Amino acid sequence: MALDTGPAQPVRMVADEATSLGDMFLRRVALDAHRPAYFHKRGGAWQPTTWGGFADGAARVAAGLIELGLEPGDRVAILGPTRPEWVVHDIGAQLAGCVSLGIYPKQSSDQVRYILEHSGARVLTVGDRNELAVALEAATGLDSLEAIVPWDAAWLEDGDDPRLTDPAALAGEPLDAEIIRARLDAREADDAAIFVYTSGTTGPPKCAMITHGNILWMMRQAPEFQEFRSDDLSLSFLPMAHVAERILASYSRINIGFATAFASSIGAVLEELGEVQPTIFGSVPRIFEKAYARVRGELEKKPPAVRALVAWAEKAGEARGERLRTGRPIPLGLRIKYAIADRLIFGKVKAAFGGRVRFSIVGAAPTPEAVMRFFWAAGLPLYEVYGQTEATVVTHVNRPGQARIGTVGQLVPGLEQTIADDGELLIRGPAVFGGYFRDPDATARAVVDGWLHTGDIAEIDRDGFVRITDRKKHIIITAGGKNLTPANIENAIKSADALIGHVHAHADGRKFVSALVVPGPLETLGYGLQRGWVDKATVERLSAELIANPAERSDALSAAMAPIVERTEYRDRIRESVRRGNQKLSQVERVKRFALLSHDFSQVGGELTPTMKIRRKAVEQKYADVLDRLYTDDGFGIEP
């Protein structure tokens, strides 16, 4: 049974009249104090917190921050999992007139220290015992940080740093409404509301200053994205430190007035989808890619008759999806076919996402077209959007009746775009950020005459749909002078087989294209289990560990994967898959030789960012010897 979000009522967005992020929140509370704002699991049951309860908690945090001596514009850092405390501390900082910033979990103490020191954060709140140990190490000798507040008082015993502060300091009497108003009035539209540190794929992260004006303008564009309802419900599990989860999800809920449920953990997401039954689901492509790979993996085990039935269902679903994407009516015959396909096949796919999802929003990286088409066919439309931190999350959207697979959609009204001579996409308008904190030179390079240089190479078709082909800094030039976009190569190879987790194309200054092909761990374990190469208990244990800790890859997991990857049957399959992927590419783009790794990329291993993007420079450095051998050792690697 779905969680009760209250009766449906007309959507009343509150960003239009708001003067700041905190003011927008107070306007929502004034309208819907008694409606649920969020749910969290306690004692095995989902407990609601109303907007009024949310406001009470945030006002207590605001009072505590002021008692600690913080002034308007001071920075408050938050390091912790996506839980209610995160958003309460975030909004509490806003009510105190402060600037809030998030730090990704699972980072090293050096990475955490860099952000704390660079931002000048005066207060850090920490929501995980292990992360607290990292934070205490990072804060050693850092005078600018004055208070470290764990979310649980029991953790105070974990260190002797005098800055450790009882969480009761942020849970006292709520801040007086008049003081809150005075604090909010001290903030201007051009003042930074939040700091967002970029994921740092090529170097130290930069700190983007997102202003109150940026956020409020973006909130006012919500009708351009989708048709939202007051009784909608989402499931929150992506890192709050990411700008999309922070603005597009959390602040949009405040503006529109619908609720969310906070997943107990990443590992519990699949189970809790069924309990929560969200109507809106937003995620990065990897979630959908894994679900698609699982479906394809299970399908391989079925007899030919079942595979033929699924193919028929997908054909009917794709015909229906194409009409939905282009806003055309669906003929009666197709509606009947789809109803049969839904009952026999697609209903099970929908049930895996809770059974009530009306649409999903996906972004942060390209989603393979095969994955997009499958979910559209299944009646779970994926609307790909595009933007970046420096443009306040979203500048292009696919929307109902105006969606085109393979593109990131059309420009949000109110913005301007152009393509530079070198193919780079430029954006101008009120979404462009306030610059990089303490880095005027980087700001001047990013924004020239009001135009944000996105760093992405793009094409715009005659209907205004934009296709991102790659990052400008990722363009590789072969020894023969050919300019290649690695994303094209990587997506073609990766989409050829569900067993492939990641692909890193390499060719800069080389005679031909080579690649690192990385096996997907869950899919590879499942493949080995199906053939009796690994026992069921081991697969179940390692899969549970991986789902619970997606940033990490244990030695036990690598040890279990290695003998599977080394099997001739497995290697032959990957070879054939790379050959199929090559067929989608031009002659110069095709992978001539590749190395098949026996382990997955990971955040902890340094190959992936917290948002699951490949750190290209780090991969090139870490696997330099492997890449060199692909060109110097004729007996090394695999040729498709």
Image: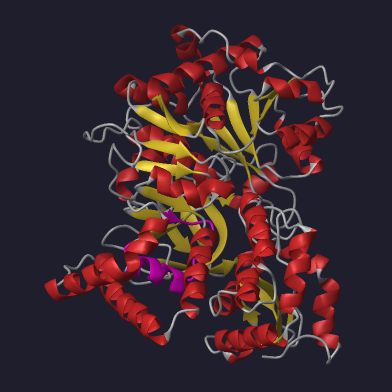
Q: Which residues are magenta?
A: 361-379
Specify the quadrant of the image occupied by residue 223: top left
Asked if residue 242 lies left or right of residue 13, the reply is right
Q: Residue at x 53, y 69 (%)?
A: 423
Most foreground residue, 100 or 216: 100
Quadrant in which the C terminus appears: bottom right
Residue 409: image x %, image y %?
38, 62
Specify the quadrant of the image occupied by residue 591: bottom right
Asked if residue 418 lies left or right of residue 149, the reply is left
One can see residue 578 in this view: yes
Count of marks placed on residues:
0
Magenta-drawn stretch contains 305? no
Quadrant in which the N terminus appears: top left
Residue 102: image x %, image y %?
62, 36
Q: Residue at x 64, y 23 (%)?
A: 74
Asked if residue 78 lies left or right of residue 342, the reply is right
Q: Residue at x 56, y 25 (%)?
A: 89
Residue 320: image x %, image y %?
25, 71
One can see residue 411 in this view: no
